[in-house]
Amino acid sequence: MSMRRVAQELDTGPASLYAHVSSKEELLELVYDRVLGEIRLPEPDPARWKEQLRAYALEMHLVLGSHRDVARAALATIPTGANSVRAGEFVYRLLLEAGMAPREASLAMDRLILYVIGDAYEGSLHHGRMRAAGIDDPGEYFENFVGQIAAYYRALPRDRFPYLTKHIDDLIADDGEQRFYYGLDLFLDGLEARLSKP
Amino acid sequence: MSMRRVAQELDTGPASLYAHVSSKEELLELVYDRVLGEIRLPEPDPARWKEQLRAYALEMHLVLGSHRDVARAALATIPTGANSVRAGEFVYRLLLEAGMAPREASLAMDRLILYVIGDAYEGSLHHGRMRAAGIDDPGEYFENFVGQIAAYYRALPRDRFPYLTKHIDDLIADDGEQRFYYGLDLFLDGLEARLSKP
DNA sequence: TACTTGACACGAACGCTGTTCGTCTCTAAA
DNA sequence: TTTAGAGACGAACAGCGTTCGTGTCAAGTA
């Protein structure tokens, strides 16, 4: 997304955008809030906090992935839009009613959001490279990317790097989605463990 | 970091850099590998895997933070430099010797690195804004940034957002360093839990 | 109705970016 | 002594975010 392209889409010049928005950053933050509005929030049920938090993270991840440039804007921003606050209240309430102390719930929310956005941003970088390489199929890109890495690791001297070279197949076994799930569940299980024995 | 500034530092023109490097991306990856070389790796001790992994994550975070532009380059890259491989072998070996299955150790390593780089990158974005705002003191920036957020949250209607408005002080209590520690320890505790009962 | 005000639109330009091309120089091998 | 080749580099291209000065047009006021 560039200001010139946005302007072109609106049949106007780039300068005109600055009558409504003070910078590209502000525009991206507005888009970020709009995008958060696409997330459907269920009625909070503290008994199912883990399940609901997981669903929220998955949906946020999905929504950020489908609006690529937004992930970066979301990273160092605590947004102040209506939808952001709505979503924040939902997550924070869920953690508190699950039994977390307010201070720890604040930390947990912050880390969960960083994880989701961080992974989505990494995904968007890959997506960008894919387009730059002129590849359309994600599977083909994944094979290309991972294949090159695997070839390089296979060529390493086994005596100096015995562990990496021995388990190359395991290193490249999981794709982006599975990696995201693993980290998310690890995070949620960790929270649960801290709840049961504080 | 821009190619023109790098060239200027070397008393030459930007075009000359392309005789040694095919793109800015490649240069950043080379820098990334150099930066990873600054990390001191201890002799791996499986009995203290958690402690050693923590120290590694802290050092990597520190090193990425002090070389700001590198974090972004590191995000969607599985680097192939000598130091990267050395560090990768260290982490992977530690996880395996701690008792993890190769497949899971691969996932764990990937997520740990994503977390460290993601947090470092977010920090670098804040640093960039700090410089853009002409502020030199991180504490002053933090107060400015967090203060604005807090003011906004305090102005929210309490009946619609009871949880957020009630615990504003807890929401802004911890700074970036403490947030990083919390997520890191949550991650490591999670790994430990999976080791004891697979 | 005539005049003023203010919001919005926008062409042109500034200074920056990564990258490419063609030309030049200078070293090392034949 | 000649030649091949690597490196250096000025100039330029296309793109970026942003600003300035000017223009337009509708609403409010006298």
Image (tube, coloured by chain):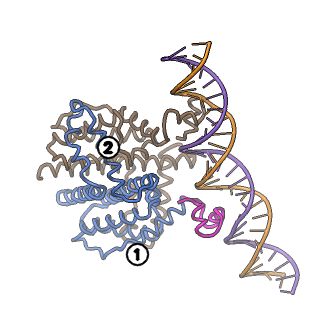
Chain colours: A blue, B brown, C purple, D orange
What amino acid type should be assigned to the residue bearing mark 2? Answer: Ile
Q: Which residues are magenta?
A: A1-24
In the rendered view, does A169 fall on the left or right side of D13? left
Front residue of B154 and A165: A165
Question: Residue placed at 34% from the left, 70% from the top?
Answer: A90
What amino acid type should be assigned to the residue bearing mark 1? Answer: Arg
Front residue of B148 and A4: A4
The residue carrying mark 2 is: A149
Q: Is residue A11 magenta?
A: yes
Q: Is residue A101 magenta?
A: no
Front residue of B87 and A40: B87
Question: Residue placed at 43% from the left, 67% from the top?
Answer: A84
The residue carrying mark 1 is: B160
Q: Can residue B122 be seen at all in this image of the molecule?
A: yes
Q: Position of residue B23 (x, y in %)?
A: 49, 41
Up-down: is A72 above or below B4? below
Q: Position of residue A63 (x, y in %)?
A: 39, 66
Q: Can residue B170 be seen at all in this image of the molecule?
A: no
